[in-house]
Amino acid sequence: MIAGLRVGHWTDPVGLTGCTVVLPPPGTIGSGEVRGGAPGTRETDLLQPGRLVEEVHGVLLTGGSAFGLAAADGVMRWLEERGVGFDVGVARVPIVPAAVVFDLRVGDPTARPGPAQGYAACQAASDDASALGGIGAGVGCTIGVDRVPGGLGAAEISAGGATVWALAVVNAFGAVVDEDGRPLAGEVPPPDAVPAWPGANTVLGVVATDAVLSKQGCRDLATAAHDGLARAVRPAHTMWDGDTVFTLATGQAEAPPDVERMAGDAMAGAIRRAVAER
């Protein structure tokens, strides 16, 4: 786990939906990348290099499809109450990028995370990120056309004096496969396969490192993490996926030359761990 990082969850085990929040320490630089044809996101434009804001104050991964983006309001309220946010003179505006998975067809379609649930996830946040599987945003996830259970996974790699940690919410159209391409969960769909609900399939990720990275460096880390996603999910980044990876750099260590490789390996490991935890 990256020093100063906290993770919290809110889970509805009956409605089969939930949300997960990642709260970084002050001064954390963030970026990200969205792939696939059916994303559901918030505040991703400002993550691009060249945009004014560099610091990220929280990241939300949530169920509930587009309805679930409302949970980010609760994360913002929790941060504002603590004086955390981008200083605009008259207020501090918390920067909270968010992305959703479609889980409405799994449990109760009217059960969706909202502001109160995002706030509760922040209240529950701690530096213990060991809770995985069917928790938070992972509780209503499925994998493959045969819809086997998906979930939440994490992996960590340390090398060259730095650490990369990845968290993945796995709700993929494709199968999760091992390093040799053998399915671990789900069946690899044939080329002409179409999901029953377009837009219902997505892998969400947060990749955090204690390395010093610029905003462009964080964007490069997201690109590498997507490469790891594509190694662990076959196929990935389809027209029916909203695959999104957010990246965070806390700036506590010198970046090793292979930090991008570490990000890809960590993301692939987190996706496979999600399968193992279910």
Image: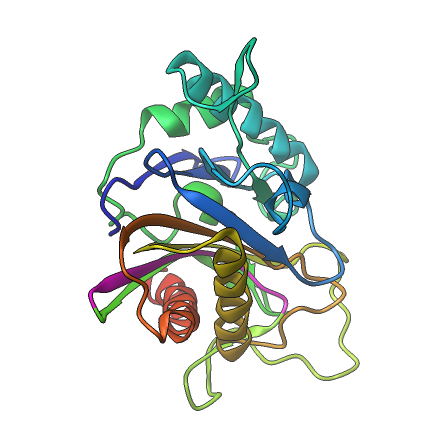
Please say whether residue 208 is visible from this viewpoint: yes
Q: Which residues are magenta?
A: 161-173
Residue lying at the far bottom in this picture: please name it: 180
Viewed as shown, does residue 18 lie left or right of 192?
left
Q: How far across and down, in percent of the image, does residue 150 sit? A: 47, 59
Q: How far across and down, in percent of the image, does residue 202 sit? A: 61, 58
Q: Quadrant of residue 119?
A: top left
Is 270 located above or below residue 176 in the figure? Answer: above
Is 173 located above or below residue 59 in the figure? Answer: below
Quarter of the image where the C terminus is located: bottom left
Q: How is the image coloured?
A: rainbow
Report the residue at 32% width, 36% height from top.
25
Viewed as shown, does residue 159 lie left or right of 51?
left
Type of secondary structure dominating the magenta stretch:
strand
Residues 230 and 202: in front is 230
Is 78 located above or below residue 260 in the figure? Answer: above
Please say whether residue 114 is visible from this viewpoint: no
Q: How far across and down, in percent of the image, does residue 29 sit? A: 44, 45
Report the residue at 46% width, 16% height from top.
80
Q: Quadrant of residue 43?
A: top right
Q: How far across and down, in percent of the image, does residue 127 sit? A: 23, 40
Counting every numbered tag in the picture gives 0
Viewed as shown, does residue 65 lie left or right of 194?
left
Report the residue at 28% width, 61% height from top.
254
Is 26 located above or below residue 129 in the figure? Answer: above
User: Residue 165 lies in magenta, yes or no?
Assistant: yes
Report the residue at 63% width, 67% height from top.
173
User: Residue 36 lies in magenta, yes or no?
Assistant: no
